[in-house]
Amino acid sequence: MKKQMYNSLRLKIIGLTLVVSITPLVLLGMAIYYRFARAHEARIEDQVRHLAESQSYAVDFFLRERISLLAMLADTHGFEKLSQPAALSELFETMNRRSEMLGLIDLGVIDCNGQHTAYVGPYDLKGRDYSNEPWFAEVMAKGKYISDVYMGFRRFPHFIIAVRARNGPQHWILRATTDSDVFNRLVKTAQSGRLGDAFIVNTEGIYQTAPRFQGKILGQSHIDPKNFSHGSTFVERRSKRGATDYFAGDWLNNDKWLMVIRQELRGQTDGLAKTRNTEIMIISLGILAIIMTTIFIAHSVVTHLEETAREMDKLNAQLIQSDKLAALGKMAAGIAHEINNPLAVIGEKAGWMKDLLLEEEFQNSPHLEEYATSLLKIESHVERARKITHNMLGFARRMEPHLDDVDIHQILDQTIELLDNHARINGIKIRKHYHSGVQIIASDQSQMQQVFLNLISNAIDAIESNGLIDVTTQQKNGTIVIRIQDDGPGIPKDQQHRIFDPFFSTKATGRGTGLGLSISYSIVEKLGGTITFESEPGKGTTFIVSLPAVAPEKK
Amino acid sequence: MAIANILLVDDEVPFVEAMTRRLTKRDVEIHAAYSGEEALEKLAHSDAIEVVILDIKMPGMDGIDTLREIKRRFPLVEVIMLTGHATVESGIEGMKLGAFDYLMKPCDITDLVEKVQAAARKKRDHEEKIIQARIKEITSRRT
């Protein structure tokens, strides 16, 4: 019952402490991890976006450079000169010789009507009419044009750069075909890490450069350029197989092309995973420590509590016992006083009747003998009742103990001597085991004698006949312990808690008042000691009187 | 002459009655009082009382108070305390206040008579001595 209560208390303490301490820890850990992951993602986003922007800028710069170059050539050489195939051819060769990096494949001059007036390059395109081509209209309107990458006649990816120039009132166009491989390489430099990708798509999502993974140039990408707003970068996230892809796009070439940087988070999360693992480990260790500490603390608190409660119980039991004794003592005193008076009256009346019996008239009565006997009986029973009331009063009296120099051994000797005859008749041997170090103490000689008399005569009564009583004294740690051990039948378990109660007696009616042990108990208690017993039914009983070894005052 | 002239003080009427009869039978001149106040009054009215048998436990003025008063006002009267206590202490207290002796209640009538006699003897001796002293004083004055 109590055990259960303490167990539930223990569980309550442990549970509450764990919940209160672990919950914030876990929440904190989660919050930190979440924040850290967000920051990490933001950093990657920034990285990817920045890469897209710079790469887009580089490519755009590259394209603008091409346009500027063409425009400069057109302006410096003029339509007249470049219309001559020889001059155009020379220019083309010079350029190709000077810079292979230009990736120039052909060069052509187109007049304002869309006629290819001059061409130098691997194909014969001279004389073709471009007037109906949409790019022609665009270059005439806007002054410059860059086509999407296409395979064209040459079966490898290239694109066209065209610029418009002015020849008097007439416009003409200088058109160059460029190997897209040149900026393909440029774009590839942005393919960072193990999983990073960089490529360009047009507005329809067609690859303009070769992507690193999946798909090839001019193939349809799975990028939908509509997701990327014009004029700004855009970060898109896609989750697949638990990995996250970051896409950053930046428009270039007058928003015709989209520079896309793709970064798969899986490759970038090593740091995050490491952080997470470290965090989980720290939190786990923390939780383990908290659990162990909590269990330990709860255990020691509850154990301490249990001990305290046990001590309290013991103390309470003692208090209850002394309270009971005090209350009963008062009651006993009251009863004794009240009974004493009628007893006195009965005694006196009986005495008066006895006096009257001496008169002559009664002397002749045939029942004189019976009267006399009855009166004697009345008187003897009044005497018996008087003894009881006097015992009760003795039990109740609340006088301060009178302190003498008391030699415990001497008192024991006297007491045993007093009882020895009685014991010997019943075949009981009383053995003394005195410890020589027992000191003279300040105590009440006659009261101590009363206690020992009670205990030893109880032992004799318990044994009834043929047995042993061992009287042992000891002194340790300022306490004198006197043990009175008999080998009688012991005290039945169900009576053990009552033996110090006043009027509790197992002796035949009239042989014991049931006050001996209660009186002994209150005497020893008043003298600052304790009286306890150990009893095993069938084996005997030991009464243990502990007295403080208080040295008598020097006189 | 009776062996003693006593005043029995006890609030227990039947006890006083029984004692009165028994002591009278034993040639003791006996007066009864049922409280401390009554006892003092009776003492004030009668010079003949030699010994007071005084119960300690009485309502109102108890035995000890009464004893104190008796000893103050009638120092020559001897007092025997009657105590219900098994302890010697109340008896001792009474003796310290000048009681002649004490007896435990219920008491043996023979003991009581003996003690009463002794007390009466002591009182008479005292009185005798006082008378002798007075006579001596008077005679010495004459010379």
Image: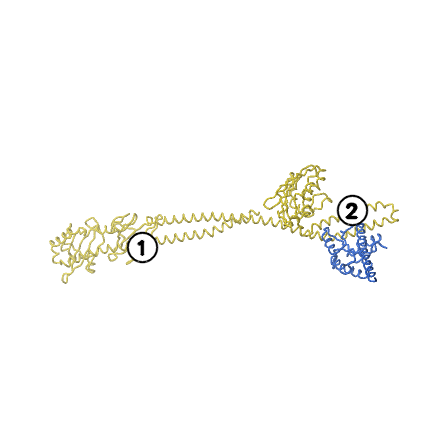
Chain colours: A yellow, B blue
Residue A46 is labelled as 1
Badge 1 or badge 2: first in the primary sequence: 1
- From the top left corner, tell me how far across and down residue A437 is, in percent: 61, 42
The numbered dot on residue A165 is none
Q: Position of residue A482 (x, y in %)?
A: 64, 43
- Characterize the local packing of mark 1: few (<14), some (14-19) or many (20 or more) Cα atoms within 10 angstroms: some
A507 and B98: which is toward the camera: B98
**Amino acid of disc 2:** Ser
Mark 2 element type: helix
What residue did someone put label 2 on? A380
Disc 2 chain ID: A
Judge left or right: residue A3 versus residue A330. left
- In front: A218, or A306? A306
Q: CA distance from mark 1 to mark 2?
A: 117 Å
Q: Chain of mark 1?
A: A
Q: Is residue A261 left or right of residue B142?
A: left
Q: Which residue is rendered at x = 43% and y = 49% of the image?
A: A286
Q: Secondary structure at mark 1?
A: helix
Q: Quadrant of residue A505?
A: top right
Horizontal side of A297 relative to A189 (left or right) equals: right
- Pinpoint residue A328: horizontal percent, then vertical percent: 68, 51
User: Nearer the observer, disc 1 or disc 2?
Assistant: 2
> On screen, B135 above or below A265?
below
